[in-house]
Image (tube, rainbow, N blue to C red):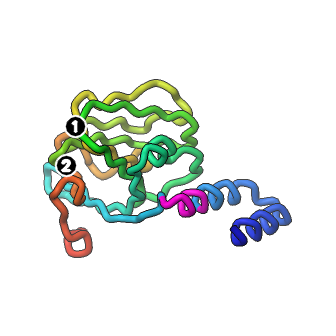
């Protein structure tokens, strides 16, 4: 709380409104327990691998909030949404300020659907099209840049297929 007040004062003096928004979103997520970084590895059908450090959204509030309000996302960062059971889901980009790739993942860690460059602040539902146990959001355009497609695998303990990210990165 004190850190946030100091940041407000310094940012008001410096006039750095955009930096405040990013710091505030990060501070809010950390205070609410959402910033639980974990490693996720993706493996493509061609054997290429990509490692991400993701925040985990498990509670109803964390899932509802997601990455809304964030103004940036690193190339190797994201958020993994963990659901209680596998069923069809739909996401939207309401109050999401940055373009995201949304990867819907089944119980085995297979990507069943990808929405590339989902449009910020769009309320159009983006359905999974199949039962999913998780969804991974990464910066818009990263899936295509890394050659990630439906049918590829997301490795995380949620899916029971963890790889040692430290030793498996290219």
Q: Position of residue 138 (x, y in %)?
A: 40, 50
Task: Check residue 30 for magenta coloring.
Answer: yes
- From the viewer's perspective, tell me whether residue 124 is left or right of residue 38: right
Q: Is residue 143 visible?
A: no
Q: Is residue 137 above or below residue 7?
A: above
Q: Quadrant of the N terminus?
A: bottom right
Taking the view exactly as shown, the residue that stands out farthest to the top is 124
User: Which residue does the numbered mark 1 point to in the structure image?
Assistant: 112
Q: Is 9 situated above or below 129?
A: below
Q: Position of residue 142 (x, y in %)?
A: 37, 49
Q: Give me the residue at 68% from left, 59% from top.
A: 19
Secondary structure at numbered mark 1: strand
Say left or right for 2 vs 118: right
Q: CA distance from mark 2 to mark 1?
A: 9 Å
The disc at residue 109 is: 2
Q: Which residues are magenta?
A: 27-33
| Residue at 40% in and 45% down | 141
Q: Quadrant of the C terminus?
A: bottom left
Q: Position of residue 107 (x, y in %)?
A: 18, 45
Residue at (19% x, 53% y) in the render: 159
Tag 2's secondary structure? Answer: loop
Position of residue 128 measured from the top left corner of the image (x, y, whole percent) = 29, 31
Residue 68 part of the magenta-drawn span:
no
Q: Tag 1: Cα neighbours inside 10 Å, few (<14), some, or many (≥20)?
A: many
């Amino acid at each position: 709380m004190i850190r946030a007040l100091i940041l407000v004062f310094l940012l008001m003096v410096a006039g750095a409104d955009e930096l405040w928004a990013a710091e505030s979103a990060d501070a809010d997520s950390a205070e609410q327990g959402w910033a639980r970084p974990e490693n996720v590895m993706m493996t493509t059908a061609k054997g290429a691998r990509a490692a991400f450090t993701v925040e985990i959204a498990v509670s109803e509030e964390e899932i509802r909030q997601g990455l809304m309000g964030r103004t940036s996302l690193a190339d190797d960062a994201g958020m993994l949404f963990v659901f209680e059971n596998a069923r069809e889901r739909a996401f939207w980009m309401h109050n999401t300020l940055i373009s995201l790739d949304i990867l819907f993942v089944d119980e085995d860690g297979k990507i069943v659907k990808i929405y590339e460059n989902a449009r910020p602040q769009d309320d159009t539902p983006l359905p999974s099209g199949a039962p999913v146990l998780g969804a991974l959001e990464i910066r818009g355009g990263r899936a295509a840049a890394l050659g990630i497609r439906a049918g590829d695998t997301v490795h995380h303990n949620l899916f029971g297929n963890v790889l040692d990210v430290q030793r498996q990165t290219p």
